[in-house]
Amino acid sequence: MRRAIGARTYGGPEVLEEVELPDPVPGPGELLVRVHAAAVNPTDIYVRNGDRARAQARQSPPPYVPGMDVAGVLEAVGPGTETTLEVGDRVMAVVVPHGHHGAYSERLALPAGSVARAPRGSSHAEASTLPMNGLTARLALDLLALAPGQVLAVTGAAGALGGYLVQLARADGLTVVADASEQDEQLVRDLGAHVVVPRGDDVARRIRAEFPDGVDGLVDGSVQDALLFPAIRDGGGFATVRGSRTEPPRGITSHQVWIVEYAEEQALLDRLRQQAEDGVLTLRVARTLPAAEAAEAHRLLEKGGVRGRLVLEL
């Protein structure tokens, strides 16, 4: 049996508890990972609080195990699985959670395409912060398909996703304008933003003040949706990670960023590993907590102001 952290009923952080589940067995095309660290993401809250109840009801009975990122050690290779990884390698992986299958678990059988070597020199906690947020940032940029020299705006730039967006966009040769609170301004500049504007409901006006013709693309990491459209030029691009509720005006194209599209893009995950090793990407751990304190991690995340990722150690 394996230990996991899950919710038998929906509710606040207090519903998270330690559960025992059958050990997973890797099948064809799968790898078994002994998990040592799992990042805590905003999407984990929806698994716990019932926002995904309708989808989860079609998957399996509770407990529902949250989590979308892990790092650990490769423990076994499923039959007929093609991989360059070897048992004993330190790895990281993106997890698409469903039912009992989530990152807050001692062992997981995962598609080989979802697993890559961990960045050299990183801790398990640091490596666990990269897969889901890194691939989400990569997907958003790929959907916008901006050319070097074009202007990208990033909101929520001080967060884990926002930080990767700024750094990857800078590496792609884009001009980056990002928002930040006063206390986060230096952090966002250090991440690589060329221009930093104050965050808030009027951030679009502030971006337009810096780029009067509007930016070529914008990634809505702050989930402000239609409030951000005025910052984008006619015919520009808008990418959202939570699903836009409004059709954008002026020929702006809206892109929905769903991580499942890149969840098995192993080559892209390995490229992120290389970029972390090269110093292009910064792996930011806000705090590590024992898995038994998952409820406290959720409380801290919901309180807001976390810079980097909270990480559970298993």
Image (spheres, rainbow, N blue to C red):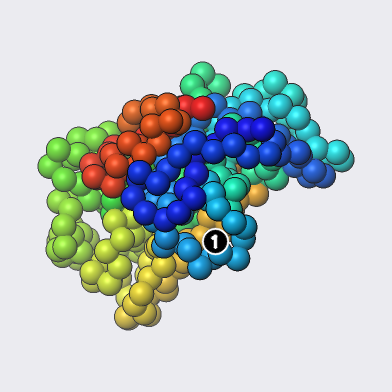
Q: In this view, does 97 lie above or below 70?
A: below
Say which of 285 and 302 sits in front: 302
User: Residue 183, percent across and down?
Assistant: 14, 38
Say which of 87 and 279 sits in front: 87
**Residue appearing at x 51%, y 27% in the figure:** 314
Mark 1 Cα-neighbour bin, 10 Å: few <14, some 14–19, many ≥20? some
User: Residue 177, percent across and down?
Assistant: 27, 51
- Image quarter in which the N terminus is found: top right
Q: How many marks?
A: 1
Q: In this view, does 234 lie above or below 178?
A: below
Q: In this view, does 223 lie above or below 7?
A: below
User: Residue beneath label 1, please?
Assistant: 56
Observer able to see residue 294: yes
User: Residue 286, percent across and down?
Assistant: 33, 31
Please identify the residue farthest to the top as the structure is shown: 121
Three-letter residue code for mark 1: Gln
Q: Quadrant of residue 118?
A: top right
Say which of 285 and 75 sits in front: 75
**Residue appearing at x 48%, y 63% in the figure:** 53
**Residue appearing at x 37%, y 54% in the figure:** 11
Q: Is residue 206 left or right of residue 117?
A: left
Observer able to see residue 194: no
Label 1 sits on a secondary structure element that is helix
User: Residue 213, percent across and down?
Assistant: 24, 68
**Residue appearing at x 42%, y 56% in the figure:** 10
Q: In this view, does 57 lie to the left or right of 109?
A: left
